[in-house]
């Protein structure tokens, strides 16, 4: 029997933020499709949540950097029971742009940009066709703070913020809700995987993963487009958006802005 909430497909569900989303969504009555590479961890989570909540749970082991695996997940999203996509799987990098080569850069761009874009598109197309559905994209506060990190990881998260705001604008009147979540530093394995010890960070800098997901779901229930769980004053985000939108009418012109007119410009020497 299918659940009233429908089915939520969660990527990166084998640990960290994705596993907590799976837990919370099962308790809200969603059936689940759990996606990640580690079949054993997915099966253990599915078994526990099935026993605790009684919802139907399937596991879909997939390496989301592989085209054929992503295609299997796209096909599962297109099935009519799926009503929620949590686009969460992601990775970080060890070191800066000076330390990473082509393989690492291609891998993170595929996992953090190309795959979530493909899955978001698959979900958007299916949900618009059925007239309802929701998409949660997990970005990062580093989308707003490129100076703080390596630039590549934070750039992938800026992409997700941009994509989500565009999707929210394009899909809201078609019955599809898009939320982008910007966590700050959150205590998960992502830090150790990229060579950082999260326990050396100042304690008031790091959020526990349960708190992060519970706050993000409050933003979801409020139908926020952008949810930033650590940010105390929403007015700061609103002001930044207002400043960005105010530039809109000036961003494309037939004439060069006077400050770039040839007679004004000074040659720059390196
Ligand atoms: N923790 C933090 O401080 C923050 C995290 N985020 C974002 O939150 C999201 C979740 O991260 P978090 O829970 O912290 O990290 P974790 O490393 O704990 O979890 C990452 C999840 O992604 C899965 N994953 C990684 N690579 C692949 C792959 N190639 N194919 C399929 N699944 C994959 C992992 O499963 P498996 O290894 O089994 O494949 C795992 O389930 C990420 O997008 C991250 O960028 C954003 C801001 C802060
Ligand atoms: N996951 C973190 C970096 O690795 C972050 O987004 O803060």
Image: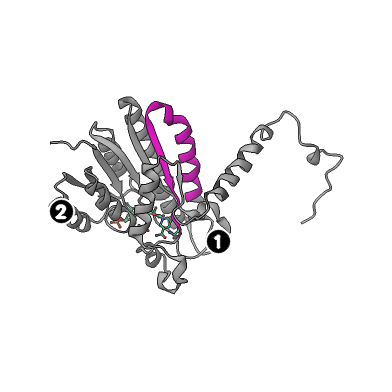
Q: Tell me which image quadrant ligand 1 sits in.
A: bottom left
Look at mark 1 in the image and give the residue it sits on. Answer: 148
- Number of other residues with Cα within 10 Å of mark 1, as a class: few under 14, some 14 to 19, many 20 or more: few
For mark 1, give the secondary structure.
helix
Please provide percent x and percent y for residue 156: 48, 50
Q: CA distance from mark 2 to mark 1?
A: 40 Å
Q: Nearer the viewer, mark 2 or mark 1?
A: 2
Is 137 positioned to the left or the right of 41 in the image?
A: right
Tag 2 near tag 1, CB within 8 Å: no
Residue 184: assigned label: none
Q: Residue furthest right?
A: 263
Quadrant where the N terminus sits is top left
The reply to whether the magenta stretch includes residue 43 is no
Q: Which residues are magenta?
A: 157-184
Q: Secondary structure at mark 2?
A: helix
Mark 1 Cβ and ligand 2 under 8 Å apart: no
Q: Is residue 47 left or right of residue 235?
A: left
Return the residue nearer the eye: 228 or 145.
Answer: 228
Q: Could you tell me what secondary structure mostly forms the magenta stretch?
A: helix
Is 169 situated above or below 42?
Answer: above
Residue 248 x/y as whole percent? 64, 35
Q: How many marks?
A: 2
In this view, the residue in front, 89 or 206, is: 206
> Does the rendering let one see residue 14?
yes
Please give the label number shown on residue 52.
Answer: 2
Residue 182 sits inside the magenta stretch: yes
Who's the residue at 47% across and 71% down the image? 202
């Amino acid at each position: 029997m299918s659940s009233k909430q429908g089915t939520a497909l969660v990527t990166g569900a084998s640990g960290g933020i994705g596993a907590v989303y799976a837990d919370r969504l099962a308790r809200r009555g969603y059936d689940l499709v759990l996606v990640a590479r580690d079949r054993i961890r997915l099966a253990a989570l599915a078994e526990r949540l099935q026993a605790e909540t009684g919802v139907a749970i399937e596991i879909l082991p997939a390496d989301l950097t592989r085209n054929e695996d992503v295609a299997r997940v796209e096909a599962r999203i297109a099935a009519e029971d799926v009503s929620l996509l949590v686009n969460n799987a992601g990775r970080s990098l060890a070191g800066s742009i000076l330390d990473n080569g082509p393989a690492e850069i291609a891998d993170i761009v595929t996992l953090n940009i190309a795959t979530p874009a493909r899955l978001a598109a698959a979900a958007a197309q299916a949900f618009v066709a059925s007239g309802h559905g929701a998409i949660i994209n997990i970005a990062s506060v580093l989308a707003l703070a490129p100076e703080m990190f390596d630039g590549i990881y934070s750039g992938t998260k800026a992409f997700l913020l941009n994509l989500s705001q565009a999707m929210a604008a394009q899909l809201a009147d078609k019955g599809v809700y898009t939320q982008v979540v910007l966590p700050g530093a959150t205590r998960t394995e992502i830090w150790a995987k990229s060579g950082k010890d999260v326990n050396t960070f100042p304690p008031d800098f790091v959020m526990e993963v349960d708190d992060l997901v519970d706050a993000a779901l409050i933003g979801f229930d409020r139908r926020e487009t952008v949810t930033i769980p650590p940010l105390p004053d929403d007015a700061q985000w609103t002001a930044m958006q207002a400043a960005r939108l105010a530039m809109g009418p000036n961003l494309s012109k037939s004439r060069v802005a006077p400050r770039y007119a040839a007679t004004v410009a000074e040659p720059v020497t390196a």
